[in-house]
Amino acid sequence: MTADPPDSAEAPGFAFTAEDMAEVTGLINKKPDQLLQIPDVCSMLSISRLSRVKSDGVSTADVVSDGVIENALEHNLDALRNVEELDRPWRLINPLRSNNYFILHHKTMKVLTVGPRTEAEILNLIGSGFQPENIRGLDLQSYSPFVDIGDMHAMPYDDNSFDVVILGWVLGYSRDNATVAAEVLRVARPGAFVLIECQYNPRSNEELNRALDIKKEPTRYQHTDDMVHLFDGHIRSTLFRHDVHPTMRHRNGDLMVIFDLKA
Ligand SMILES: C[S@@+](CC[C@H](N)C(=O)[O-])C[C@H]1O[C@@H](n2cnc3c(N)ncnc32)[C@H](O)[C@@H]1O
């Protein structure tokens, strides 16, 4: 039998000294939001903030368009009571942080995240360098001052409002992805970055609808090509694409793409 490997902090040559920890504590005291660069901290804070929300503290959209699949609101209100996968947004946002334009300009860039559900994504964005006053979320439900109530098929924002628009695991709740894409193109500024993540799921639509208790067919994607196709004619360049590995198509996975729009 082999022993469990030591935690990284205990591994030979990797022990933190008291001086190391004093340096880290000094940095955190000076810039507490540096802690938001740690995914577990964002998840923990998001759960703790959500636990203080009273039952009447969650507002919901009164009217939604035909594009919203049936049960979307009920399903997502349930999911708010049993939060999971709070570190998922990091997988999508991290590649953007390698982009030179982003590195130089992120402090002034305005970002919209569509369908954040919890504040985990908002905290991830602050940890990625966006200023809190430049961050908006849009969702059918909200308990957060960062998240506006609204429907992605008719976004409550002016034209050319955002430098970055994020659609993280939300297109599946729409029967009309073309209208969502048109709304993204309307509210995004010329040259804006668009980040999209959709779930790849090997189950059939029927199996999935039964499992999720969703009555109308959600939009499903098999490859990032189909997600990119929604924005045909508007893309300047693709920064990042992630398709499901050929040996892993029997299990759930992520389809992710980041591109910038023509200026
Ligand atoms: C699966 S969660 C995604 C959470 C997070 N973005 C992530 O990647 O982990 C989908 C969210 O989209 C929201 N949503 C669904 N349909 C929407 C619509 N038409 N407009 C705005 N938000 C919507 C849901 O209420 C839910 O909070």
Image (spheres, rainbow, N blue to C red):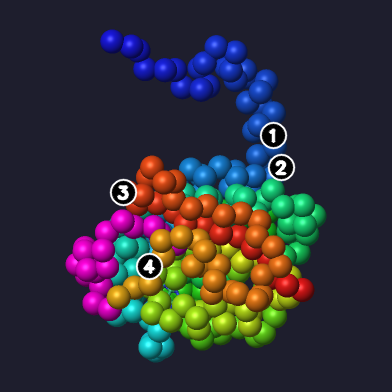
What residue range appears in magenta? 198-216
Q: Name the residue carrying label 4.
A: 220
Q: Is residue 46 visible?
A: no
Residue 18 place in picture, x, y as percent: 63, 19
Lower position in the chain sequence, tag 1 or tag 3: 1
Q: Earlier in the sequence, mark 4 or mark 3?
A: 4
Measuring from the top left, give residue 64's x and y in whole percent.
40, 86
Q: Which residue is mark 1?
A: 26
Closest to the observer, 192 or 221: 221
Ligand 1 under 8 Å from disc 1 Cβ = no
Circle 3 is placed at which residue position?
250
Q: Which of the numbered marks, if any, corresponds to residue 30?
A: 2
- Give the amino acid at mark 4: Arg
Whether 135 is drawn above or below 71: the answer is: above
Q: Residue at x 57, y 55 (%)?
A: 241
Disc 4 + disc 3, Cβ < 8 Å: no
Name the kind of residue labelled 2 in the image: Lys
Picture quadrant of ligand 1: bottom left
